[in-house]
Image (cartoon, rainbow, N blue to C red):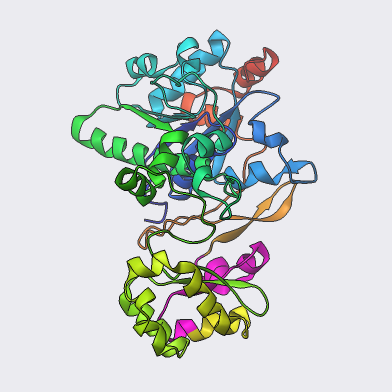
Amino acid sequence: MENGALSNIVVLDLTRVVAGPYCTAVLADLGAEVIKIEIPGKGDDSRSYGPFVNGESLYYANLNRNKHGVTLNMKVEKGKEIFRELVKKADVVVENYRPGVMDKLGLGYDNLKEVNPRIVYAAVSGFGSYGAYHKRPGYDIISQAMGGLMSISGPEGGSPTRAGNAMGDILGGLNLTIGILAALNARQMTGKGQRVDVSLVDSVVSSLETCTQRYFATNEPPKLQGNRYGHLSPYDSFKSKDGMFVIGCGNQKLFSLLCLKALNRPDLLENPMYLTNDLRCQNHKTLKAEIEKWSENLTSEEAVDVISAAGVPAAPILNLKDISENRHIAFDREMFVTVEHPIIGKMRVNGNPIKLLDAMPRIKSCAPLLGQHTEEIFGKFLGMSAEEINRCREQGIL
C-alpha cells in the first residue's frame, strides 16, 4: 500500500492546538488526505505558541505535518456553503470546539448528515457533548485534574502533579482516532456515518486502569507514591552512582532472577518480608534500600546492563537529548523524522508510533503555511476557478 492504509479517506480537519491535531496527524501519517481548515488571517491558535524559528511555530509544525492547509470563514453564508460542498466529498469531519458551537453555525452533525449521510462526525472536547459539565471549557490541565491523573502523580508526601506533557490531550486524540476508525468500519456495514464523541476527562479516567480498582477494593483513594507502582515490587526508580534508573519486576520469576543473577543476594529470596509480591509491596521501602546498597556503587548504565543481562526489565531514565540520539528509538523506530519547511528549514517532527508493516505510516510533507493549499484543494474538490477564489478572498470568505 504505497499511499497508506487510509489513502481512500478524506478528512476535513477543523481542530486546533493538540488533541484534535494529534488525531488528524495520525490519520494523515497513515495515508488519509487531511484538509486543515483554518480561520483566515489567524489560523490555529497554536501558530502563536512557541518555540519559534524564523517566526514560525514548531509547536504547530510538529502536529500538522502531512496536511493540506486552506482558510475558510465559516461564520458567513458563502463560507458555510463552501464547507457543505466539501462535506459532500469527505468521509470524516473532525472538530474540537466547545459543544454546541458547530450546531449554532448550522454545521453540526444533524445538519451535515443531511448533506452527506455517510459522513463520520468526530468531536473531542473537555467534557464531551452531553452530561452536567458538557458546556464547560476544557484544556489538558483540566482533564488531568478532574480525570484523577494529578491525584496519583507526584512524590510521596508531596503535592498532586501534572504529567510533564499534555497527556490528557494525547489520550483524547488517540481515543478520537480509534472512534473514527471504528465508525468508518461500521459505515462499511450500515452505509451510514455517525457521531464520535470523545471527552478529555473520560480519556484520562479510562487511563487510570487498576488505580480505580484499588479504590473500589479499599474505599481509600490511592496516595501519591512517586515512581513506585502500588501493585508490584520492586517496580520503581533507584539511585545509582551517577543518577537514577528503573527496574520493573512483574512476577516472582523476575524477582528471583534479580536477586540471584544481578544482585547476588539469594538471602532476599528467603527473607520473610519479601516472599511474595504482596509482601514486597508492603515492605517496598526496605527492599528499595537493599537494592540501592548494590546500585549506588554502579553507574546507571552499568546497573541496567547487569540487570538486563539477568533477564529482568530495567532502563535508564532518558532525557530528550538522550532520546533524540538513541539508535533504537530515534532511528530504527523512526520516532523523529526530518522534514523541510519553507520558512523553518530542516526540522525534526515526532514520528508515528503505529507501525503497519505492510503499510507503514509516512511523514512526507511539512505543516502547511496558513492557507497554502487553498487554490489546489478548492479547485480539486469544488472546481473553483482562480478568479472565484480571489473574489472570495477579497470578500473575507477565504
The reply, left or right, for residue 250 in relation to residue 239 is left
Residue 42 drawn at (x, y percent): 69, 26
The residue sitting at 57% across, 48% down in the picture is 163
Count of all numbered marks drawn on residues in the image: 0
One can see residue 365 in this view:
yes
Residue 388 drawn at (x, y percent): 60, 17
Of the 4 image quadrants, the one containing the C terminus is: top right
The residue sitting at 34% across, 41% down in the picture is 181
81 w.r.t. 382: above or below: above
Kindly give the residue lying farthest to the right in the view shown: 54
Question: Is residue 185 or residue 174 the one in the foreground?
Answer: 174
The residue sitting at 61% across, 67% down in the picture is 318
Question: Is residue 112 or residue 371 the one in the foreground?
Answer: 112
129 w.r.t. 255: above or below: above
Of the 4 image quadrants, the one containing the N terminus is: bottom left
Q: Please provide the residue range marked out in magenta.
A: 307-333
Query: Is residue 56 covered in magenta?
Result: no
Query: Is residue 315 covered in magenta?
Result: yes
2 w.r.t. 300: above or below: above
Question: Is residue 190 or residue 319 the one in the foreground?
Answer: 319
Residue 389 drawn at (x, y percent): 61, 21
